């Protein structure tokens, strides 16, 4: 499950609440910007850009502590691209979701021989839980906040979710909360506190489950095709592997059948070319 993506969904669904939390100022008009930036476009699933009247808030959610390129450099790269494209001040906040002792979670600058670039690193396990328990948009993050009794905190979160009057909203928030709580709690314990009936009724939760199942099936089909290709042709060029990787599950299954007829790399490339045109 991609926990970073769930946080991105929350930030883009409730942009005003996230701006008020992270910038400490009340804003009424907040615009969600596209996450693709020009100049050799890059797109990151866990990144959200929110534009207020006079600045941009760049939020990046992290569960991993190792990345390529390293996180501080990536933050600098985003900063330069945002300034170039929008020409307004940029505030950058990296939010670490899962408790860790790795130095990167406590790093707030990029440093090279000639450049220093600073940003904020926010660690969820150090945040006061009361703010999150009292804010509907931030409630799914509450299980990750500071507490001397994690079980008591999750129980408080579950009770708060249960009191949400609107049924659809209650289902959505319960779904987000159950997923993010998985970074800290056992699944069975979460289900004991968060009503399983609410979870199963949630359209968003079912969509997440379905996408997870589809992703698993696609990965299985991809691995199967690559193993067949290696058995047939030996080592496969990385460019071919990448072309196979982006095929849909249906086309991967078609490739598995086509390999009964494909006898050379030339035939394989021709088949891939045909699929990319269709």
Image (spheres, rainbow, N blue to C red):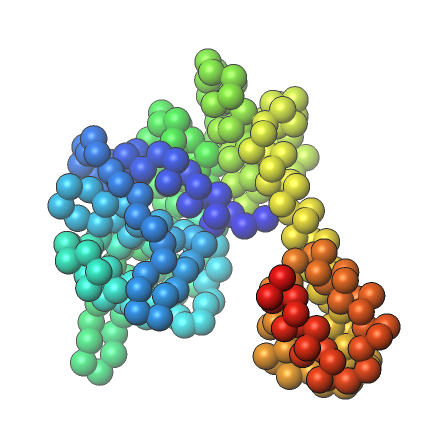
- Residue drawn at x 68%, y 77% is 270
Q: Is residue 179 left or right of residue 111?
A: right
- Residue 179 sits in quarter: top right
- Residue drawn at x 72%, y 78% is 268
Residue 209, image x, y percentages: 64, 40
Residue 227, image x, y percentages: 78, 73
Q: Is residue 118 left or right of residue 162?
A: left
Q: Is residue 126 above or below residue 42?
A: above
Residue 226 visible somewhere in the drawing: yes
Q: Residue pushed farthest top? A: 165
Q: Nearer the viewer, residue 223 or 26?
A: 223
- Residue 171 sits in quarter: top right
Residue 224 visible somewhere in the drawing: no
Q: Is residue 264 above or below residue 146?
A: below
Q: Nearer the viewer, residue 10 or 192?
A: 10
How many discs mark residues in the rendered view?
Answer: 0
Q: Residue pushed farthest right? A: 260
- Residue 255 sits in quarter: bottom right
Figure quadrant of the C terminus: bottom right
Residue 147, image x, y percentages: 43, 37
Q: Is residue 2 left or right of residue 113?
A: right
- Residue drawn at x 51%, y 34% is 177
Q: Is residue 6 above or below residue 116?
A: above
Residue 188, image x, y percentages: 68, 35
Q: Nearer the viewer, residue 157 or 51?
A: 51
Q: Nearer the viewer, residue 267 or 128?
A: 267
- Residue drawn at x 35%, y 27% is 135
Q: Is residue 18 left or right of residue 235?
A: left
């Amino acid at each position: 499950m991609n926990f970073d993506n769930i946080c991105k969904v929350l930030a883009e669904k409730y942009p005003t609440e996230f701006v008020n939390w992270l910038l400490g100022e009340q804003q009424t008009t907040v615009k969600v910007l596209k996450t693709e930036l020009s100049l050799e476009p890059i797109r990151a699933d866990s990144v959200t850009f929110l534009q207020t009247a006079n600045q941009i808030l760049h939020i990046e959610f992290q569960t991993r502590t190792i990345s390529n390129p390293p996180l501080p450099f990536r933050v600098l790269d985003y900063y330069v691209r945002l300034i170039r494209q929008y020409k307004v001040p940029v505030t950058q906040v990296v939010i670490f979701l899962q408790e860790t002792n790795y130095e990167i979670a406590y790093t707030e600058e990029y440093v090279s021989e000639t450049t220093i670039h600073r940003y904020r690193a926010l660690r969820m396990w150090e945040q006061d839980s009361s703010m999150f328990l009292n804010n509907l948009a931030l409630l799914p993050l509450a299980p990750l906040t500071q507490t001397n009794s994690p079980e008591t905190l999750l129980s408080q979160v579950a009770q708060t979710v249960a009191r949400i009057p609107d049924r659809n909203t209650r289902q959505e928030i319960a779904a987000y909360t159950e997923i993010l709580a998985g970074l800290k709690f056992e699944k069975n314990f979460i289900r004991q506190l968060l009503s399983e009936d609410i979870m199963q009724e949630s359209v968003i939760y079912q969509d997440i489950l379905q996408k997870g199942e589809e992703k698993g099936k696609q990965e299985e089909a991809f691995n199967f095709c690559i193993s067949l290709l290696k058995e047939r042709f030996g080592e496969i060029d990385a460019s071919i592997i990448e072309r196979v990787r982006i095929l849909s599950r249906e086309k991967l299954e078609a490739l598995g059948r086509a390999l009964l007829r494909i006898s050379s790399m030339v035939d394989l490339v021709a088949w891939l070319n045909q699929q990319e045109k269709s």
